[in-house]
């Protein structure tokens, strides 16, 4: 059996308010090197490091890092004083991690033929996006809205933004087919499928670069990265990863 090569395998999170239905995203700033994705919203998460053994271990680590209430200044790209109060960030982190203790948060794996823009040149890549979902009580969203309205940051590794579905779609209607896009990377594939399957919304689409395509994989998010190896090969694992000897993942 010929295995499909992967350039990346991030774990991403659909975070939503249980009452409002609003979504929490990370937001690329206006210096993001991939110009068509500047000021685009992306699902919060990240790529595995050499110690992660499964998409869920990557997810737990990413949530703890992204919502660190007391980060070290040397690890930040901005002044620590820009962060919201530690108790606000810590409560959001704890609420996210607590969701997993109450139910299976794994939603789906998506195989995506993506388009990145390193050096501002459209470049195809292949990736699995392992997607989990986490609904939070509205009080956490209210805390985050207040912090963001006050100009505070709630994430250690980027900007956060809260969008309703309607505001996302209004923004999407206003952009051209060449970007800058409202949502980045795999989100134009992932979010419409999620909204159709989980919310019964059939007509939602988002613009993305020409050539972007994807599909869900059978079986859902798996228990380990090893369990993907019968069908896929990881082209760019870090050199010191247990599955070693491959180049480093791109970041998507």
Image (tube, rainbow, N blue to C red):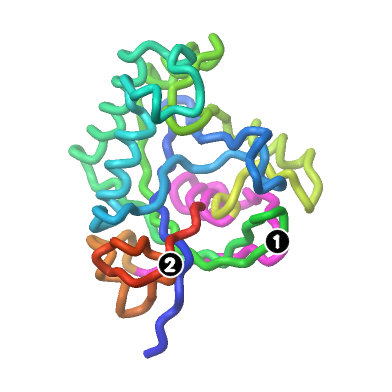
Q: Quadrant of residue 168?
A: top right
Q: Quadrant of residue 70?
A: top left
- Between discs 1 and 2, the one toward the N terminus: 1
Q: Quadrant of residue 209?
A: bottom right
Residue located 32% across and 21% down the image: 69
- What is the spatial separation of the Cα atoms under label 1 and label 2, in whole angstroms? 21 Å
Q: State left or right for residue 67 relative to residue 117.
A: left
Residue 117 horizontal/vertical position (percent):
66, 55
Residue located 78% across and 52% down the image: 178
Residue 184 horizontal/vertical position (percent):
60, 47
Q: Which residue is mark 2?
A: 247
Describe the element under mark 2 as helix, strand or loop.
loop
Residue 223, above or below 187:
below
Q: State left or right for residue 5 relative to residue 38.
A: left
Residue 202, above or below 227:
above
- Of all residues shown, which one is farthest toward the bottom? 1
Residue located 25% across and 49% down the image: 57
Describe the element under mark 1 as helix, strand or loop.
loop
In depth, the one of 249 and 128 nearer the eye is 249
Instruction: Answer whether residue 141 is visible to the viewer in this image.
Output: yes
Q: Which residue is mark 1?
A: 122
Q: Dividing the image into 4 quarters, which one contains the N terminus? A: bottom left
What's the magenta region? 189-218
Residue 182 horizontal/vertical position (percent):
67, 41
Residue 196 horizontal/vertical position (percent):
52, 52
């Amino acid at each position: 059996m010929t295995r499909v090569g992967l350039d990346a395998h991030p774990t991403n999170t659909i975070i939503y308010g249980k009452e409002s239905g609003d979504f929490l995203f990370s937001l690329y700033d206006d210096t993001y090197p991939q110009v068509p994705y500047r000021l685009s919203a992306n699902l919060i998460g990240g790529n595995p490091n050499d110690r992660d053994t499964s998409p869920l271990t990557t997810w737990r680590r990413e949530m703890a890092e992204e919502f660190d209430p007391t980060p070290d200044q040397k690890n930040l790209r901005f002044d620590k004083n820009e962060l919201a109060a530690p108790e606000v960030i810590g409560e959001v982190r704890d609420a996210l991690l607590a969701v997993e203790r109450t139910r299976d948060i794994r939603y789906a794996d998506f195989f995506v033929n993506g388009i990145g823009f390193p050096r501002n040149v459209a470049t195809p890549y292949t990736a699995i996006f392992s997607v989990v979902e986490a609904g939070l009580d509205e009080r956490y969203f209210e805390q985050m809205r207040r912090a963001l309205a006050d100009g505070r940051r709630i994430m250690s590794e980027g900007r956060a933004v809260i969008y309703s579905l309607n505001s996302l779609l209004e923004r999407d209607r206003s952009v051209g087919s060449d970007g800058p896009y409202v949502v980045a990377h795999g989100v134009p594939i992932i979010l419409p499928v999620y909204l159709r399957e989980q919310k019964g919304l059939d007509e939602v689409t988002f613009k993305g670069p020409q050539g972007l395509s994807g599909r869900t994989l059978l079986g859902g998010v798996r228990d380990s990265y090893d369990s993907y190896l019968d069908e896929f090969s990881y082209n760019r694992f870090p050199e010191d990863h247990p599955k070693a000897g491959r180049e480093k993942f791109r970041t998507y």
